[in-house]
Amino acid sequence: NIGDGSVIDVGGSGATPVNGGGSGSVVLIGDPNVTLRPTIPVRGGGSITIQPRGNLAIGGLADSRADHRSLAAGRSGVACGCVRPPRQSGPMNAAIVRPGRNSHSLGRILPFVVYIGLLAATPYLREALPAGWDGRWLYAVQIAAVVLALAWFARGYEELRGFTLGWRDGLEALAVGVVVFVLWINLDFPWAMQGEPGAGFDPRTAAGDIDWTLAVLRILGAAAVVPIMEELFWRSFILRFIDKPDFMELPPASASWRALAISSVLFAVEHFQWLAGLIAGLAYGALYMRSQTLWSPILAHAVTNLLLGLWVVATGAWSFW
């Protein structure tokens, strides 16, 4: 077994080199904080791709089946990334994969925390702005920060690589998105809300005209960024983590109805309209479990938010923003 803090030498002087123009790859599996220190030579432009699973500090590559089997005996981790050594002659230099960028858990939690943290801080940040500065542009900062966080951890979002959504699942997601939108704008009963409605995000100028730059920014943020960030957190992470802490090893279809219910209640708590949020959480979670691709709830979520944004601009019901 590979334990925490271990340093393991694999390969050796007899390892088959990767020559110029050639390439090799292997998946390394082990416990967190394991350092792999191989000595496979790379000559004249050859390359080796390392795909770690687990928070491994990697100095190279195990090349033999025996080495791969011994590493696989350790407890499976959850992160994935790639390292390509420099083009050179002789033994390749050690390269370290930073565990943080390859952590599936952190990659799903941090963008969400950034979004909620900035949302909670917005009233205080507005007060701190110099006189004459428009606090509504803080939403652009909020969305930009989330985009940067998602981009930083992008290598760990394997389930988003390629648009793996069939036309039947796509139509189902579109339909669910429309239904959730219709319910959202009608489930605005006082008892279905957490307090009194606020002013919301009002993109109008002092003259009463809509500032279309602000309006489009809000719609794009809600329809293009928020669905990816929230579905990675609520469905990909929380829904499966409730059943299995090593959540990447749990297929969406194997998630329990208990996990769906709990994650949906938590999703409802995040939203001012808790009843609408609960129904949306159940619908998006069920889509994920049924289709087994995260693109399904992302699409449904995006449709809901897009239609909601267009409806808000058309009706002036800014409190829904």
Image (cartoon, grey):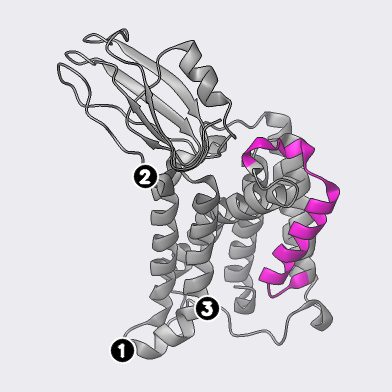
* Amino acid type indicated by mark 1: Gly
Q: Position of residue 189 (x, y in %)?
A: 82, 79
Residue beneath the point at 32% across and 84% down: 133
Total marks drawn?
Answer: 3
Q: Is residue 86 magenta?
A: no
Residue placed under numbered mark 3 in the picture:
120
Q: Position of residue 167 (x, y in %)?
A: 68, 30
Mark 3 Cα shell of 10 Å, populated few (<14), some (14-19), many (≥20): few
Quarter of the rendering containing residue 251? top right
Is the C terminus in the top left, top right, bottom left or bottom right quadrant?
Answer: bottom right
Query: In the rendered view, does 97 fall on the left or right side of 251?
Result: left
Q: Disc 3 marks which amino acid?
A: Ala
For the residues carrying marks 3 and 1, which lies nearer the camera in this image?
Answer: 3
Q: Where's the N terminus, which quadrant?
A: top right
Cα distance, mark 3 to mark 2?
30 Å
Whichever of labels 3 and 2 marks the residue nearer the N terminus, that label is 2
Gap between marks 3 and 1 measured at Cα: 22 Å
- Asked if residue 97 lies left or right of residue 3, the reply is left
Q: Kindly report which numbered mark, 2 or 1, lies closer to the viewer in this rendering.
A: 2
For the residue pair 215 and 124, the one nearer the viewer reads as 124
Range covered by the magenta-colored residues: 248-274
Look at the magenta stretch and give its main secondary structure: helix
As measured in the structure, the alpha-carbon distance from the residue carrying label 2 to the one carrying label 1 is 42 Å
Residue 33 lies in what quarter of the image? top left
Examine the rendered structure and indicate whether residue 222 appears above or below residue 191. Answer: above
Q: Residues within 10 Å of mark 2 (few under 14, many from 20)?
A: few
Q: Which mark is residue 98?
A: 2
Q: Is residue 159 above or below residue 312?
A: above
- Up-down: is 34 above or below 245? above
Pair 3/2: label in front: 2
Mark 1 highlights which residue? 132
